[in-house]
Amino acid sequence: MAVPPLPDPVPTHLPPGFVSFPDQALEGRAVPLTSGPVTPVQGPKTTRMRRYIPAPPSIEKLNHGPLVRVHVSYATAFAPEWFEGLTGAPVEISGSDGYYRTSGDQVSLIILRGAWVVEVITVGVSQAETLAVARSLNFA
C-alpha cells in the first residue's frame, strides 16, 4: 500500500526574530518509546522535522534555546496504546485534538491531525507563541 509523503512542517508564524536551522527539513526513522506490551504497527515510521531558533543561528541556541521544533509523523506508526495514554491540557487546533504539556521551560503540544501526528516543541517560548506556531501549520 502506497502512502503519501509526509507534509513539510513549515509554520507560517514564528516568534519574532526566529529563523530556520538548518534550512532543510530533517527526515528520520524512529519507533515511539512505550512501556509494556505494544500492538504491532504496520505504518511507516518516518518523521519530518524543522527547527527554528533566534537569529543569528548558533549551536549554543540550538542546544539550549530558545527554540521551536515541529515534527510530523504518520499516525499509523503509533500503537493504539500510545493514543490512549496521551495526557495534557486539551487544546483544539483547526478542528484537531491537541494535548498541551509543560515541563520547566519546555512545552510540548501534540496534535492529532487525521493521518498525521504533529508535535510542536518549544523551549523558552510562551504558551501563546507555541499555540500560534501550531495554529499556523497548514496540513490539508
Image: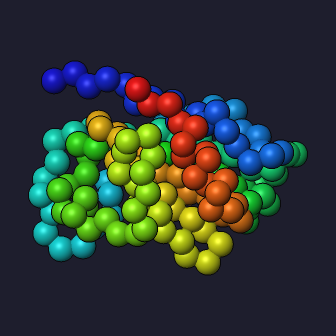
Is 23 drawn above or below residue 76 in the view shown?
A: above
Quarter-of-image position of residue 43: top left
Between 3 and 127, the residue placed more toward the observer is 127
Residue 115: horizontal and vertical position, in percent?
A: 29, 36
Residue 48: horizontal and vertical position, in percent?
A: 47, 38
- Residue 21 visible in the snapshot: no
Q: Residue at x 80, y 46 (%)?
A: 16
Q: Residue at x 67, y 39 (%)?
A: 13
Quarter-of-image position of residue 20: top right
Between 99 and 78, the residue placed more toward the observer is 99
Q: Is residue 111 left or right of residue 22?
A: left
Between 139 and 135, the residue placed more toward the observer is 135
Q: Residue at x 71, y 65 (%)?
A: 124
Quarter-of-image position of residue 76: top left
- Residue 13 visible in the snapshot: yes
Q: Residue at x 40, y 69 (%)?
A: 88
Residue 9: horizontal and vertical position, in percent?
A: 53, 36
